[in-house]
Image (cartoon, coloured by chain):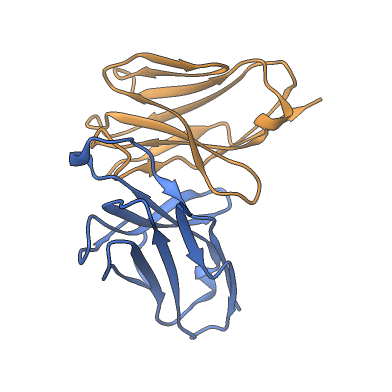
């Protein structure tokens, strides 16, 4: 099993450009999450999904959109990138509470995004 | 919403010494408290967790304690080794599981020889 994968690994954008980050998981997890990690600020939740076709806002959703068209994929979009969105982005997945299974968020390897 | 504070932000210990990282949370409904370890350039990984019906949990050299009344929990690492050097994150969730975690800001642990 590959676990949680993310593409791309690195990306440099100019202000105003758009891009999509792809997260894929092969563990049949119901829940998926997007975080950003900035120095001294830990992991902050951007958006999350509790199942195929559903999305919800996290702590810092402004400037981002997401879609979960398939259970195994969770896409994060930046419509008009800003320098403040320079960060490392992590995707994660987990079972839902009702499944009562192993309680861990499994993280992808991260995407380092720089916006100039 | 939940707010998790973590201290210290950096911690340096000598190999063989113990390390303690502390976290406080604000939401009394939180009932699940995991700890994640992130090595340099790598992804966070779960190392230990505790639920609100337990006061302490141990796994070899690592242990976590929880004080629900005071709303704080701590990570204890004994006999530290160089490979323990990493950033450690605490988190809290009201669901009893890994969903809807709020993370602390992290502690950079450096174990020196």
Count of numbered labels shown in the rendering: 0
Residue B81 location (% of width, % of height):
71, 24
Most distant residue in the front direction: A1
Identify which residue is drawn at 40% across, 14% down. Answer: B56
**Nearest to the observer: residue A65 or residue A38:** A65
Q: B106 above or below B74?
A: below
Q: Is residue A105 above or below residue B7?
A: below
What residue appears at the point 42 percent right and 53 percent down from the top-left corner?
A: A44
Q: Name the one closer to the observer, A100 or A92.
A: A100
Q: Is residue B100 left or right of residue B35?
A: left
The residue positioned farthest toward the left in the image shown: A98
Chain B image colour: orange
Q: Quadrant of residue A99?
A: top left
Q: Which chain is depicted blue?
A: A
Residue A63 figure quarter: bottom left
| Position of residue A35 in the picture relative to residue A47 (left or right) | right
Q: Residue at x 33, y 55 (%)?
A: A32
The image position of residue B11, as x and y in percent, is: 65, 30
Q: Is residue A78 left or right of residue B19?
A: left
Q: Position of residue A89 (x, y in %)?
A: 49, 61
Q: Position of residue A113 (x, y in %)?
A: 56, 69
The quadrant of the rendering that contains the C terminus of chain B is top right
Residue most toward the right? B113
What residue do we see at 54% from left, 55% from top?
Answer: A109
Quarter of the image with the N terminus of chain B in it: top left
Residue B15 found in image quarter: top right
């Amino acid at each position: 099993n590959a676990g949680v994968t993310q593409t791309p690994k690195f990306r440099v954008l100019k202000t105003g450009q758009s891009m999509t980050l792809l997260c894929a998981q092969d563990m049949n997890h119901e829940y998926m999450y997007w975080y950003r990690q900035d120095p001294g600020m830990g992991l902050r939740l951007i958006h999350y999904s509790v199942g195929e076709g559903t999305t919800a806002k996290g702590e810092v959703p402004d400037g981002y959109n997401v879609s979960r068209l398939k259970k195994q994929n969770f896409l994060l979009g930046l419509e008009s990138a800003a320098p403040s969105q320079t960060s490392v982005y992590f995707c994660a997945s987990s079972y839902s509470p009702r499944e009562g299974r192993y309680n861990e968020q499994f993280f992808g390897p991260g995407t380092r995004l720089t916006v100039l | 919403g939940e707010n998790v504070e973590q201290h210290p932000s950096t911690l340096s210990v000598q190999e063989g010494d113990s390390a303690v990282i502390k976290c406080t949370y604000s939401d009394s409904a939180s009932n699940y408290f995991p700890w994640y370890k992130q090595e340099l350039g790598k992804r966070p990984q779960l190392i230990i967790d505790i639920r609100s019906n337990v006061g302490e949990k141990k796994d070899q050299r690592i242990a976590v304690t929880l004080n629900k009344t005071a709303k704080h929990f701590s990570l204890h690492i004994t006999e530290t080794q160089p490979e323990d050097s990493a950033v450690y994150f605490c988190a809290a969730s009201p669901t009893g599981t890994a969903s809807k975690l709020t993370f602390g800001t992290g502690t950079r642990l450096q174990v020196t020889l």
